[in-house]
Amino acid sequence: MRQPIADITPETKAAEITGWVHEIRDLGGLAFYVIRDRTGIIQATIVKKKAPEAVLEAAKAVSRESVVRIAGPVKAVDKAPGGRELIPETFELIARAETPLPLDVAEKVPAELDTRLDSRYLDTRRPRIAAIFQIRSTVMHAVADLLYREGFISIQTPKVVAAATEGGTELFPIAYFEKEAFLNQSPQLYKQMMMAAGFEKVFEIGPIFRAEEHNTVRHLNEATSIDVEVSFADHEDVMALLERLMKNAYEAVFERCAPQLETLGVALDIPETPFPRITYAEAIDIAAPRIEEDLRFGDDLGTAAEKAIGEEMGSHYFVVDWPTAIKPYYAMPYENNPELCRAFDMMHPRMELSSGAQRVHLHDLLVEQIRAKGLSPESFEFYLQPFRYGMPPHAGWGLGAERVVMTMLDLANIREAVLFPRDRHRLTP
Ligand code: ATP
Ligand code: MG
């Protein structure tokens, strides 16, 4: 019976393993085959004078990264990885890997990100890379888990849509029979419609598509968005939810992914909640003197500004009280000061992780705000209609899953947190 490699200890008597040939070292009379499965590595040691003929034959035929099955007694050996080694009595070549390999899994030869992504299936055999995706999986599990526990229902909304969420930029048009259609930029309009549907607390984890023109280390053309929308809630309520969710995700990784964090050499810093809040005006005051560009009230916070503020803040923080003019039409203006709105961004010192707001739930105000952005309410009729038949006040946010993982693990490039990234130059694999 196949045993996970990590379960084999110096006390184990005998074992059968299946896995990949990580390394081969032939010293003449002695040969070491380091075998790897997803749990770890073990050294299989062949003493040529003593080994059965069939073992010698099979071992000679294998190449690195071939899939093999090996069975035999286990011996405690101090110098071997994990303090034990396997002495093959049987050695079966299950699937031979061609040589040369497109990528050195043992990482003796460093590879560029592009080369790695071209052979992602080999790249992910590296424990360091596998660790990223095990942690990502834990984050996604923890996120869904918290939302279910808090009474949310999970929804799936269309990814082929007729209207842009926020106007024409960053859209991918697609061929959809005789009609003009796009890939969705965000589930924004649909999750809001589900507030009129009476669901009260919804979340969706799904792809968003953005035709970002520039290649940056924090933008993808296809990203994963964690979206929530909550009825009878304001922006403060959903900011508190976001804090709970972030803390829960970090704690889950801390508790369940110690080996992966060690493999990555990451000392996880669980962020303290509540996150500090600064107003947009304060953010401008912090950034303006620290960056070269001209930055004034009413400008978007660009990369340089985000960086300058991040250095000052040093941990996760919120930027609140944004000018209504630079946030989407669905952000609710303050009644006593409609120049500002109930929108927020949740930031990691390195970049934005989430945008959210209390939404406009009043039909006429929404129409007014759509017009103010130079958009036409007619093309949003399917979205506006529910606002005429009893729309509760509501609030929500969208959180980029890849950015959460990227900042959590201090990855240099967001592509490290996606199995098959889509960017301007990459459409395969
Ligand atoms: P940025 O200004 O950093 O490009 P944004 O403000 O355009 O982001 P939003 O529309 O607010 O992004 O989307 C909500 C969240 O979704 C972002 O905070 C981010 O975490 C994530 N996100 C948005 N666009 C991308 C993208 N192209 N690649 C990866 N994540 C993204
Ligand atoms: Mg944003």
Image: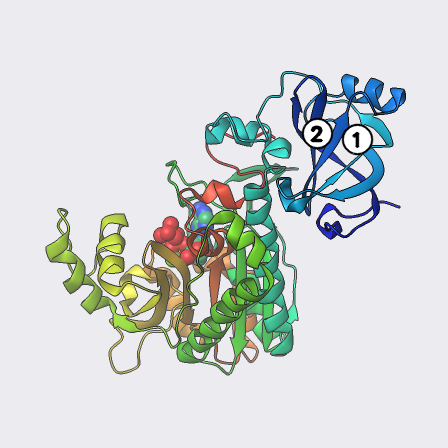
Q: Left or right: 251 with respect to 284?
A: right
Residue drawn at (51%, 83%) of the image: 232
- The residue carrying pointer 1 sits among few (fewer than 14), some (14 to 19) or many (20 or more) residues within 10 Å by Cα, namely many
Q: Nearer the viewer, residue 115 or 218?
A: 115
Q: Nearer the viewer, residue 402 or 179?
A: 402
Q: Left or right: 350 with respect to 281?
A: right
Identify whether 95 is placed above or below 380. above
Q: Amino acid type of disc 1?
A: Val
Q: Which residue is mark 1?
A: 68
Residue drawn at (62%, 31%) of the image: 122
Q: Amino acid type of disc 2?
A: Tyr
Q: Which mark is residue 33?
A: 2
The answer to whether one can see residue 181 in this image is: no
Q: List x then y, in percent, for residue 404.
A: 47, 57
Quarter assignment of residue 27:
top right
Q: Earlier in the sequence, mark 2 or mark 1?
A: 2
Q: Left or right: 240 with respect to 49?
A: left
Q: List x then y, in percent, for residue 151.
A: 63, 78
